[in-house]
Amino acid sequence: MHNYSKWLMRMAAIYALIGALIGSDVAGRKEYTMVPGHGHILVVGWLTLFVYGLFYHVFQEIGMKRTAKLHVWTSIIGGGLMPLSMLAYYTNENTVTLITFISSASVLLLAIILFVILMFFDKKIFAKN
């Protein structure tokens, strides 16, 4: 699980940088259509992935390893693609950007559902040693 923690935190750092760059662009150009994407990349991409990384660092013993692996990958993919596809949709509304936005949001929703499954159904996470 340490490897999951490392990659989630590294991706969180990349998403934080992307969010900061988008925020700088928003402030510099005073073009506020990108604000929702900027906020989401910071909250979903940076904050959420970092917290997931801390989770996998603290809870080394996880019984549902396949679920955890799927959770990590869907979090990394959905955490970055959903805010970026949101930006694409808000700047250029068409069918392709809408489908991309909905698809990436669905991947992110799957990641959250998998995390809830781990929290409630993995017997090793909260097992007393």
Image (cartoon, helix red, strand yellow):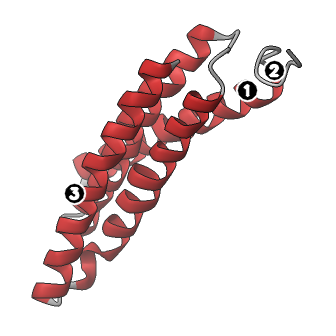
**Residue drawn at (63%, 31%), measured in percent from left and top?**
58
Mark 1 or mark 3: name the one nearer the start of the chain: 3
Q: Residue 44 placed where, x, y %?
A: 45, 53
Residue at x 10%, y 86% (from the top left corner): 29
Q: Position of residue 103 (x, y in %)?
A: 40, 39
Placement of 23 over or under 117, stated as above or below: below
Q: Helix or strand or loop: what does disc 2 sit on?
A: helix
Residue most extreme to the right:
128
Residue kind at label 1, given as amino acid type: Ile
Which amino acid type is marked by label 3?
Ile
Which numbered tag is attached to residue 86?
none
Q: Nearer the viewer, residue 112 or 90?
A: 112
**Quadrant where the image shows the C terminus:** top right
Q: Element at badge 1?
A: helix
Label 3 vs 2, first from the N-terminus: 3
Q: How many marks?
A: 3
Q: Can residue 125 be seen in this view?
A: yes
Q: How crowded is mark 2: few (under 14 residues within 10 Å), some or many (20 or more)?
A: few
Q: Name the residue under label 1.
A: 117
Res 60 → quadrant: top right
Q: Is residue 124 above or below residue 9?
A: above
Cβ atoms at labels 2 and 1 below 8 Å apart: yes
Report, in whole angstroms, how far the alpha carbon at label 1 lies from the one at label 3: 30 Å
- The residue at which mark 3 appears reads as 18
Seen from the viewer's position, the closer of residues 38 and 2 is 2
From the viewer's perspective, is 81 left or right of 9?
Answer: left
Type of the residue with mark 2: Phe
Report x, y in % for residue 95.
27, 50
Badge 2 is on which residue? 121
Task: Name above or below for residue 3 compared with residue 5.
Answer: above
Discs 3, 2 touching: Cβ within 8 Å: no
Residue 37 quadrant:
bottom left
